[in-house]
Image (cartoon, helix red, strand yellow):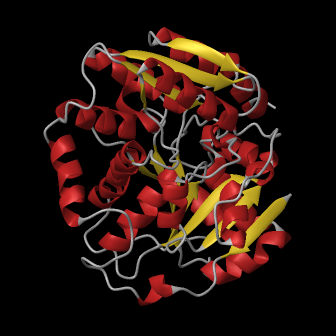
Amino acid sequence: MTSLHLAPPRQLRNTKAGPHVPGLFSGDEYAAVARFFDERPALAATPLVALPSLARTLGLRNILVKDETERFGLNAFKLLRARFAIEQLLAEHVIRPGDTLVCASEGNHGRAVAHTARAVGCLARVYLSESVAAPRAEAIGAEGATVVRVPGTYDDAVRLAALDADANGWTVISDTSWEGYERIPRLIMLGYSRMVDEMVGAMPDGWRPDSIFVPGGVGGLLAGVASRSARLWNPPPQIVAVEPASAACLQVSAREGRPTIVPGPFDTVMGGLRCGEVSPLAFDAAAPLVDAYIGIDDSWAMDAMRRLARPSGDDRAIRAGASGGAALGGLLATLSDPAAAPLKAALALDESSSVVVIVTEGVTDPPLWHRVVDA
């Protein structure tokens, strides 16, 4: 199953790079992110990996993987933004060592918050929906966090975490925004922009991808990547959001023109993308900048996991989890699924095209990875 939404012709194609580019952040804010990471050389960039054999197989010029499988020694991209946001809050004295940091998670965000909290001397409390796989929960507990299981979906965990934090004076570290809670999600999205700067640093001068396929979720990564891309490149790459077809809250919201809830439960192995409610702040920032939304069946993500783990030719092997394989799965569906033919045509994907796919996580659920890759 593949569901598709193409954005209508919009202002992005007529936007000139510069200070008035749409998006959440100013040039000064992007400069602050650059200084933060430049002053911390231990927080090294993740690689941009070329897969020429796969590109030839799929009829493209280049496929480049932004490989987040070992970000800062962990196996998911979310440590990038958690580290930036939490250290900014410490510097501003919004939080202090010894405080309790609270979040809801499907796994990766919780581990990132727990890891960073321990590093800066804070406590962590992570709320997980009942569908989160045991290995993900165990990894969070191993970082010293208190794990709280919540009946229902990720969105239910978000609400309970916020209620408990308010009742106990704890600080919520969430990339999902709501009325009155926008400062921290904004910092988190700003931290994501570093990923695009790392891509630029790994590319030849003057080169840009034609398209970037980005996992969706609540929209934070999508907004960060789309906003930074719009400022750095003129014209910017085409941005494609990839979601599970059963949890395509960004696609549904784009069709409706406003944040719209997709009710659960969500039947997908892409645990990190098992979301039914967008972040309003992220959605509003991303909507003018995203070219298309594609919802994919699990089979596409699992195909991507296998292709990454057991590559052809001299391509480097990448051990990606199901959510990590989503962006490549979206590209595979776009190129191969007749239902996605309009998207392939709109993006003009052919032998002259260079595409970046963001692989957001490594093997966060080993039993699932082995079942998929060894099948």
Residue located at (55% from left, 69% from top): 287
Residue 87 drawn at (x, y percent)? 25, 32
Query: Front-most of 95 and 266?
Result: 95
| Residue 43 in view in this figure | no
Residue 123 drawn at (x, y percent)? 38, 14
Compared with residue 168, is residue 13 higher up or lower down, i.e. above or below? below
Left or right placement of residue 318 versus residue 133 in this view: left
Q: Quadrant of residue 46?
A: top left
Query: Front-most of 354 and 326?
Result: 326
Residue located at (28% from left, 26% from top): 95
Residue located at (15% from left, 47% from top): 35
Residue 232 drawn at (x, y percent)? 31, 70
Query: Front-most of 373 and 102?
Result: 102
Q: Quadrant of residue 251?
A: bottom right
Q: Quadrant of residue 373?
A: top right
For the C terminus, the image quarter is: top right
For the N terminus, the image quarter is: bottom right
Residue located at (58% from left, 74% from top): 291
